[in-house]
């Protein structure tokens, strides 16, 4: 196949089902990359003597939400499945860990429950007489490094799987675009591309 004679100057938006599916895969890949970034920062945060609980909760919650979103079925069926998880080349109870992560996500995203502490109210009594009200709390443990490493390992393997699917769908979208005539291509909406800042290639 000969190379194009000119450097592409425009990008046209493709509205085909294959293009929409490719966009879904790109979104899933981005979510998995977010999980990996959160896990990397969590490992760093958990390695210090006194981790910042707000930072840890923020990173862990974002990782759980991003991970779970990858398994939403969606209208085009691009979401990952449990079969994808069981097919990974990882040792141990991978599916059980995956299911636990999805349960944790429900816990952290529950709009009616505090994910970090549970509270109880009691009465302070002296000589059989109530003297005041006591509010006690039990704080949930922070995620440990092993949990974070296991989550990152699954996300990494899944990102490789999604990357392969993206490559396959890119070929399908390009093949469909090449079947269009120049005039048909001209009718497609142009996508505005942001220029790189000065000094960048």
Image (cartoon, rainbow, N blue to C red):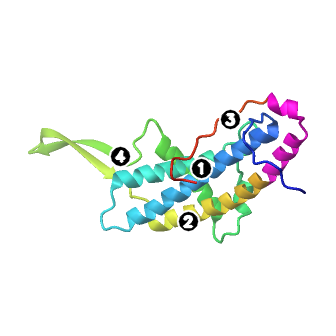
62 part of magenta stretch:
no
What separation in Å lies between label 4 and label 3 (alpha carbons)?
Answer: 49 Å
Magenta extent: 168-187
Dot 3 crowding, Cα within 10 Å, few <14, some 14–19, many 20+: few
Quadrant housing the C terminus = bottom right
Q: In this rendering, which labeled residue sits more in front, label 3 or label 1? A: 3
Which residue occupies 35% across, 46% down?
Answer: 118
Which residue occupies 66% across, 58% down?
Answer: 159
Can see residue 116?
yes
Q: Locate residue 141: give its quadrant.
A: bottom left
Give the image location of residue 191, x and y in percent: 68, 35
Q: In this rendering, which labeled residue sits more in front, label 4 or label 1? A: 1
In the rendered image of this protein, does residue 145 appear above or below residue 29? below
Which residue occupies 87% across, 46% down?
Answer: 175
Q: Earlier in the sequence, mark 4 or mark 3?
A: 4
Give the image location of residue 115, x and y in percent: 41, 46
Q: Which residue is mark 2?
A: 150
Q: Is residue 27 left or right of residue 132?
A: right
Q: Earlier in the sequence, mark 2 or mark 3?
A: 2
Label drawn at residue 118: 4
Q: Nearer the viewer, residue 2 or 72?
A: 2
Q: Which residue is mark 1?
A: 31
């Amino acid at each position: 196949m000969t190379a194009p004679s000119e450097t592409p100057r425009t990008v046209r938006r493709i509205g085909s089902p294959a293009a929409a599916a490719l966009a879904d895969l790109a979104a899933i890949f981005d979510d998995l990359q977010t999980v990996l970034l959160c896990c990397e920062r969590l490992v760093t945060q958990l390695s210090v003597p006194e981790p910042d609980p707000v930072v840890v909760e923020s990173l862990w919650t974002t990782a759980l939400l991003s991970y779970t979103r990858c398994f939403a079925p969606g209208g085009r069926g691009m979401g990952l499945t449990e079969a994808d998880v069981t097919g990974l080349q990882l040792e141990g109870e991978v599916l059980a860990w995956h299911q636990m992560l999805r349960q944790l996500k429900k816990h952290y995203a529950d709009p009616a429950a505090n994910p970090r502490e549970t509270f109880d109210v009691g009465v302070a009594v002296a000589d059989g007489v109530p003297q005041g009200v006591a509010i006690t709390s039990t704080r949930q443990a922070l995620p440990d490094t092993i949990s974070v490493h296991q989550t990152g390992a699954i996300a990494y393997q899944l990102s490789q799987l999604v990357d392969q699917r993206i490559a396959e769908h890119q070929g399908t979208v390009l093949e469909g675009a090449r079947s269009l005539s120049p005039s048909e291509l001209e009718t497609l909406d142009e996508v505005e591309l942001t220029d790189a800042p000065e000094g960048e290639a």
